[in-house]
Amino acid sequence: MDHDHEHRDGKPGHSEPGGIQARVRALETILTEKGLVDPRALDRIVDAFETKIGPRNGARIVARAWSDPEFEVRLLADATEAANSMGFSSPVGAHLIAVENTPETHNLVVCTLCSCYPWEVLGLPPVWYKSAPYRSRAVMEPRAVLAEFGVALPPDTQIRVWDSTAETRFLVVPMRPPGTQGWSEERLADLVTRDSMIGTGLAKSP
Amino acid sequence: MTSLDAAFLGLPREAEGPVFREPWEAQTFALTLALHRAGVFPWSEWAAMLAEEIKRAQAAGDPDTGATYYRHWQATLERMIVAKGLSNARTIDRYSSAWAQAAHRTPHGTPIELAPKDF
């Protein structure tokens, strides 16, 4: 066999015939032959994550919470239900908790063990969220991490770090920027960035 | 975020980049979700196994910057499939070699299809 065509995966000591692409295809073939997966269902999953599920969903939730005090109460009481009511539910049945930023408290979300993340409202996590430096430093020195993201908080603002699990995921509700009175939900949603809902950013100012 | 930040942070950064960087990342992700939906494993079991795989890779020298994340994902999926008795390591290796062979004999730009002669 011509080894130029193999994709080495760079893990010394691991013999993995075929390279990563061939290995993924192998699993798909094996599982399809067993009738455990349907290739069309796989395409639908990929399509949903590439085109429908993303931080725009979370931004709409935050914008509604900013605009509708009753919804805000519901969101903070039971975010799973509030997100469901807008058509967003966890693909893996995880519980969603919304944590609200205030002048006194800033919330920051991490998954120290792997990459648990509220897919239904934020899509799939960015690479840095999955990296060892973020996973460890967010807990040990959150203020320094925030500073590196360009977020400078007043010294008396407390930072709460939330560690996600397979069952429990967190959505940060950032503070509504001043100067946005009377804005529509749609316009407000444009101010809500992905990072502001992880806690590594603030909502954009108009 | 600017690339300047990324340079002195040591944190890998990206803007709103593509969800999956390569098709195989999307495929291993979708396979896992499909198996979970088929009731093969609860998500908590998946997360625990993935965390273990990441820790193991890190101990073996993986820089764990997030760039190799879906490789860990794929390794976890292989382990899960074996653990649940859906296949075994030998079969997975055999099919992988066959797919590599199919890719090798297929001219560039043509869809790769697995044939009995690849095994």
Image: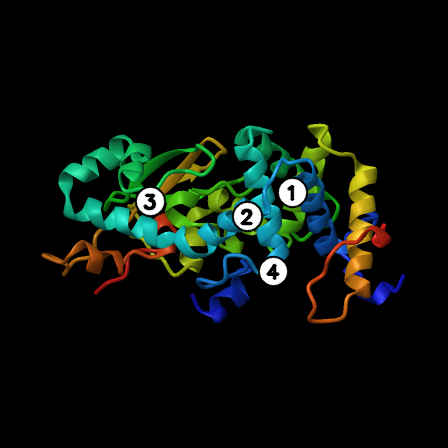
Classify residue A148 by image quadrant.
bottom left
For this view, does B39 lie left or right of residue A7?
left
- The answer for how far apart the CA atoms under marks 1 and 2 are is 30 Å
Tell me the residue that label 1 is attached to: B54
Kindly identify the residue that appears in the image at 53 percent across and 43 percent down.
A115
Out of A71 and B103, give the one closest to the viewer.
B103
Kindly identify the residue that appears in the image at 36 percent across and 57 percent down.
A151
Kindly identify the residue that appears in the image at 57 percent across and 60 percent down.
B21
For this view, does A170 lie left or right of residue A165?
left
**Closer to the eye: label 4 or 1:** 4
- The answer for how far apart the CA atoms under marks 2 and 4 are is 19 Å
> Label for residue B22?
4
Tell me the residue that label 2 is attached to: A40
Question: Is A67 above or below relative to A79?
Answer: below
Disc 4, disc 3: CB below 8 Å? Answer: no
**Closer to the eye: label 4 or 3:** 4
